[in-house]
Image (tube, helix red, strand yellow):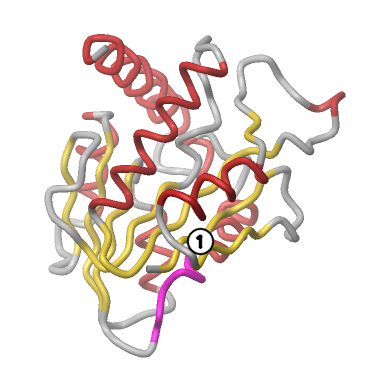
Amino acid sequence: MENDKNKLLSEVAEYYSSKLALHGETPQGVDWNGKEGQYLRFNQLSLIIDDQKPFSINDIGSGYGAFYDFLQERHTEFSYDGIDVSVDMISAAKLRYKDQANVHFHVGSQPAKRADYGVASGIFNVRLGRTDLEWSTYLQDVLDTLDQTSSLGFAFNCLTAYSDADKMRDYLYYADPCKLFDLCKRRYSRNVALLHDYDLYEFTILVRK
């Protein structure tokens, strides 16, 4: 089982390293269409944050650190830890933010320490040939990690099973928002929000503790 997980993570790392090599430190470099859509989903994820006080946050699947850019434009007192399985992504991120004192990056799939909040953006979309069962198992494993390494709450997004059929692709994973909402309510917290009212083929779930 552990070997299967390591193989999956290796495939994910290779996939995103190739995107970075092709497109550089851009939304396309982390497999998004553009900055507008990227920031729209970042805005949904950031709703988990109580911005009235300083906070710490872990970003699982951080890529080159685009979510840090988003946060920096809106908050002054926070610390950010980016985690990614792609060595190339982390190398780019460390160089990009080498002069920032409140940001750190490391290679892996687990945060180095507990934070107030945890986020995962876009990491559940490209299934890389895995079955629904394999990918949903991976997804829940990441949610368990987010839960275990966040004190105040966590947020994540997925492509939605309510997408238009003619626009759905076999290599992408479309999650059932109702099932994941139910999972989060039963497994992690009574305080869960499902956001499915923004103009993308996806949804965001916020889990408050």
Image side of residue 141 versus residue 48, left or right: left
Q: Which residue is mark 1?
A: 206
Q: On screen, 31 above or below 191?
A: above
- Residue 137 horizontal/vertical position (percent): 43, 25
> Split into 4 quadrants, where in the image is the C terminus?
bottom left
Task: Give the extent of the magenta segment.
Answer: 46-51
Image side of residue 99 versus residue 198, left or right: left
Does the magenta-highlighted stretch encompass residue 50?
yes
* Local SS, label 1: strand
- Residue 152 horizontal/vertical position (percent): 32, 70
Which secondary structure type mostly characterizes the magenta part of the structure? Answer: loop
Q: Residue at x 65, y 30 (%)?
A: 174
Q: Residue at x 47, y 43 (%)?
A: 26
Residue type of the residue flagged with mark 1: Leu
Residue at the farthest bottom position:
52
- Residue 47 horizontal/vertical position (percent): 51, 71
Q: Quadrant of residue 168?
A: top right
Q: Quadrant of residue 201?
A: top right
Q: On screen, 60 above or below 141?
A: below
User: What crowding class fits label 1: few (fewer than 14 Cα within 10 Å), some (14-19), or many (20 or more)?
Assistant: many
Q: Residue at x 40, y 20 (%)?
A: 18
Image side of residue 2 versus residue 9, left or right: left
Does the magenta-highlighted stretch encompass residue 36?
no
Q: On screen, 76 above or below 84?
A: below
- Residue 126 horizontal/vertical position (percent): 53, 25
Q: Quadrant of residue 3?
A: top left
Q: Residue at x 72, y 34 (%)?
A: 161
Q: Between residues 13 and 64, which one lies in front from this camera angle? A: 13
> Split into 4 quadrants, where in the image is the N terminus?
top left
